[in-house]
Amino acid sequence: MSVEFLLDLPRHYAAGTRSGIVSVCSAHPLVIEAALRDGLRRDRPVLIEATCNQVNQEGGYTGMNPADFRRFVERIAGDVGFPLSRLILGGDHLGPNPWKHLPAEEAMERARVMIAAYARAGFAKLHLDTSMGCQGEPVALSDHLTAYRAADLAAAAEAALPLGLPAPVYVVGTEVPIPGGALEALDHVEVTRPEAARQTVEVHRHAFLERGLAAALSRVIAIVVQPGVEFGNDDLIVYDPEKARPLVSSLSELPGIVFEAHSTDYQPGRALSELVRDGFVILKVGPALTFALREALYGLDQIGLQLGLITPDQAVSAVMERTMLDQPSFWEKYYPGTPAQQYLQRHFSLSDRIRYYWPHADAAAAVERLMTALGAEDIPVPLIGQYLGGSRAATFDYVGPRDARTLLILAVQRQIELYQAAVEG
């Protein structure tokens, strides 16, 4: 069912149906649980994606290879009762990026091993991204070389497919700036030119056919383009349909193709619906979900302090600050400014680089201590209203548990619901 659902996306768009799918790009167990619970309630498939930096044959920053990640997600699905037949796994930005400091052939060989591992593990959606230069190469490569390398990876994936598993769909192309949000203040972003979108499809078509990959080419369902959305550390560019109109018009010349939109985090619901209407039917979201989770954890911190259940030095926010200062590699080159400005960005930046620290032993212990202290009892509504004011559980017409763990799930689902409202048409 999962591959068929994805293959149907271009067919449905061409037929005039304005619907799509949310791509949840996160390895955080609570985010994944929230997405699966939401999908269970809606009786819809759920797409969970891992990036090449998160999950690869060397473990990535999560310590998981693709087979590990599948087992990890499936365990959560089993816990919540989500049927595996509706679970779709994807690999995002699969290419040489984790090894781009190496010579190109060495980096590409590792990328081949990685994408083969994703294919063997049954990932149904593979985004081929070979746009980055490796050692001694330009930062950005030509379209032709990018497409040739993408076809090389597709060949590795096709060769690794186990018997009995459906063949995956592919997404090609990349977006500018880098995944995960812009590094500097935003003035504007350039919407992908229609001729660039057509060129992306054409060069990949030639590269796939040269490699004898006609069957794989028939499963290229989308290209990644820049619709004119982006977020930085504390600012956001909202989708403007008028500026994207020439790009959107190009879809009529690209049969069997839809757009995949990255960096849609923090877009208002109206903009998300407009994106889907205009053919960006795969909406990727990641940092906005872990940002919402962090907001809720910090709110629960304050509730724990008000109730006298934890001390200030035990607060999750205090532990995260110490952890990030001890191990600054995930944030220091992304957060310029004075020490005070860097402090605010470490904790509250929209790019949410704090998400890289949640698996750290000290961070996990702090969260566990807070959750144990708050226990399974309902938290009083006035405290929820004070420190998690946006939660639906802050109102007296909410019917359901108000324990700490439920409040975390609700915080993430509040964001997911914006996306689901857009993709359900």
Image: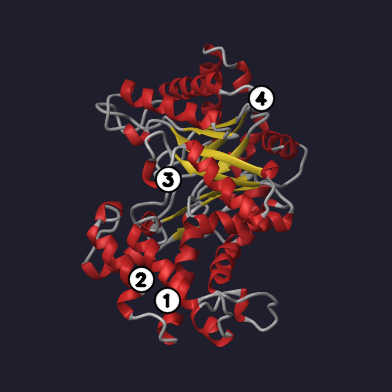
Q: Which residue is mark 3?
A: 179
Tag 3, which secondary structure? Answer: loop
Left or right of 143 in this view: 83? right
Q: Which residue is mark 2?
A: 317
Left or right of 153 in this view: 242? right
> Any mark on residue 301, and which?
1
- Amino acid type at circle 1 is Asp
- Amino acid type at circle 3 is Pro
Left or right of 142 in this view: 247? right
Q: Position of residue 16 (x, y in %)?
A: 77, 42
Q: Position of residue 418 (x, y in %)?
A: 62, 60
Q: Residues within 10 Å of mark 4 (few under 14, many from 20)?
A: few
Q: Nearer the viewer, residue 345 or 311?
A: 311
Q: CA distance from mark 2 to mark 1?
A: 7 Å
Q: Which residue is mark 4?
A: 164
Counting residues from the N terminus, which is met first, the one under dot 3 or under dot 2?
3
Q: Nearer the viewer, mark 1 or mark 4?
A: 4
Counting residues from the N terminus, which is met first, the one under dot 1 or under dot 3?
3
